[in-house]
Image (spheres, rainbow, N blue to C red):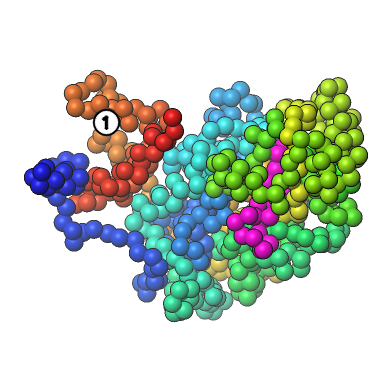
Amino acid sequence: MKAILVIASLIAWLPLSGCSPPATSNVRTDSSPSAPSNEPTDVIVVGAGISGLSAALDLGRGGSRVTVIDMSSVFGGHAVMSQGSVSIVATPAQERAGIHDSPDLAFQDFHRWGEDPDTDWVRYYVDHSRSDIYDWLDELGVRFSEVVASSGNSVPREHQPLGRGIGLVTPIYRACLELGKIDFVWNSKVEQLLTEDGRVVGVLVRDMRTGQEHKLRSQAVVLATGGFQSNLDMVREFWPAEFRFPDRILAGSGRNSIGLGHQMAQAAGGELIHMDYQWNYFTGLPDPRYPGTNRGLNATNLYGILVNAEGRRFANFHGWAKEVMPILLKQKHATCWCIFDEAGKPFFSVSGSDWGDFKKVEKLIFQNPDLVKHADTLEDLAKLAGLPAQNVVETVARYNDLVEQGDDKDFGRFGPGKPEFSNKASPKIAKPPYYAMQTFPLTRKSMGGVAIDSQCRVLDKQKQAIPGLYAVGELTGLAGINGKAALEGTFLGPCIVTGRVAARSLLKELEVAPQSAVPSESRCAACHNMPDLLSQAREGFWHFEKVHRATQERSLDCRHCHSELTPYREDEHRINRQSLTASCVLCHVAQE
């Protein structure tokens, strides 16, 4: 038995070719927290969200040495927790679904829906989203499950990635780790920008766990710190003048979206523009994981109806925030209820990569009587929700009658000539039990922010670029691509685009020689011809063949299961059997 155990332990460390066990002295670890190195770096990126990671990856691939600093100990910012949908124009995924899209059509949609968008940035986005987003993500291993229709779009162009936000952001971060040119400094806050002779030359960093401060120098700094929608004081300060600030509002943006980048940019002379362009939702549900706080979830059920405090429909549910929020904020009570039935319950959704499990939704939300009321009659439901019972009964009856007629004559939610998106989710509300969920205004995205030019350089009040300072993503109000109102999927998309534009601008400014990037997946295929290996059954390879056929069917790349093998280092290139056990759940889901 002892001999067998020894052999098994050696097999676990066998390299892909050869039989020598590894030298333990070469094992690399990624400890956390990590202190900034005193060695000079080319570019500092402040923020490891999707815009910061996009900028860092292209900078690293272009030959620059990059240091990414983040207040968290994990990557992804708010994007990794999001639904992950991305608005992309004229893609192969649309073509496969028979969807005919074009940059000109998208350009019209952005302007018709967006209200005062930045025309130049919109033009760039619709013309380059296919190459800058879809093709780039596809090469990194991101896969899209579907393209869905959403408010304001003439055609479906909201691309939903497999795995929601985590499925979108992880491949970008993984590619950063593989380069060997990008260092990450976690649990650290940039306290201020360092300047010399009018140029930004680095940052002052404080380790949030130890309190130690370090100065880190660079040739340029990219601010990718996100928006300010989790700072309710800033939300109130820049609240649109035409609307009354609600009595209760929930914070639904990222934990660190508190305006730190805005403050740093201002201190360096940067200008803030359109700060009242705030994209907030009416679907704020108090987050049951943080009782007694102002944290909220974006929760809704488009198969239900929306009623106000009087128990009456008051807006087109499918007009989303653009139509509902202005009307809601003018109500005496800025709160609403989503009412649906048992047949519509499966379509209830909570945004975020951590809310994909309906068992979790059932336990934390539906079984929480403070969040969702349910009853076998509409009268009882209305009493539990504190709504006028007669109004609720009449409202649902009227709605069901309009569904039978096939035309929402009251609010135009569905009917002849309406988009498929509107007609699709319009069933009767008739199968008990019935449900009512009260929601409140929810802060979500900042669509104004630090002023930038077409190269993502931060501008001062005289519209002059501040040397050495760039800004990307939500910090810039998403480059003004949305204007005052956003098409769905137009938050993460502009984050990627501005990150990549900033990287290209910096590589040109720093005169870094272009380098071609070889995807890790291509390096794997160079040595391991999987189609050939799977072409015929071989004795003793039944499990190898089964799992690799399954991964090919799912379009998973090698790194999904063998992350310990990247980046490639010849003296460490061997399978770690312990790490490999984490991939078993891809096939074995522990269900009958």
Which segment did they paint magenta?
A: 283-302
Look at the image and tell me in which quarter the C terminus lies. Answer: top left
Look at the image and tell me in which quarter the N terminus lies. Answer: top left
**Outermost top residue:** 536
Q: Which residue: 67% across, 63% down? A: 292
Q: How many marks?
A: 1
Residue 322 image position (x, y, % from top left): 78, 46
Q: Is residue 139 left or right of residue 538?
A: right
- What is the crowding at mark 1: few (fewer than 14 residues within 10 Å), some, or many (at least 20)? few
Residue 98 image position (x, y, % from top left): 61, 23
Q: Which residue: 37% across, 29% down? A: 550
- Residue assigned mark 1: 544
Is residue 561 rendered magenta in the image?
Answer: no
Work out whether 29 lies above or below 109: below
Q: Is residue 489 left or right of residue 76?
A: right
Give the SS element for disc 1. Answer: helix
Residue 473 image position (x, y, % from top left): 59, 55
Work out whether 401 lies above or below 514: above
Q: Which residue: 59% across, 46% down? A: 363
Q: Is residue 589 visible?
A: yes
Q: Nearer the viewer, residue 461 or 413?
A: 413
Kind of residue sitting beneath label 1: Phe
Q: Nearer the viewer, residue 390 or 347?
A: 390
Q: Nearer the viewer, residue 229 or 467?
A: 229
Work out whether 41 lies above or below 28: below
Q: Is residue 103 visible?
A: no
Q: Which residue: 73% across, 48% down? A: 283
To which quarter of the image does residue 306 belong? top right
Residue 205 image position (x, y, % from top left): 48, 74
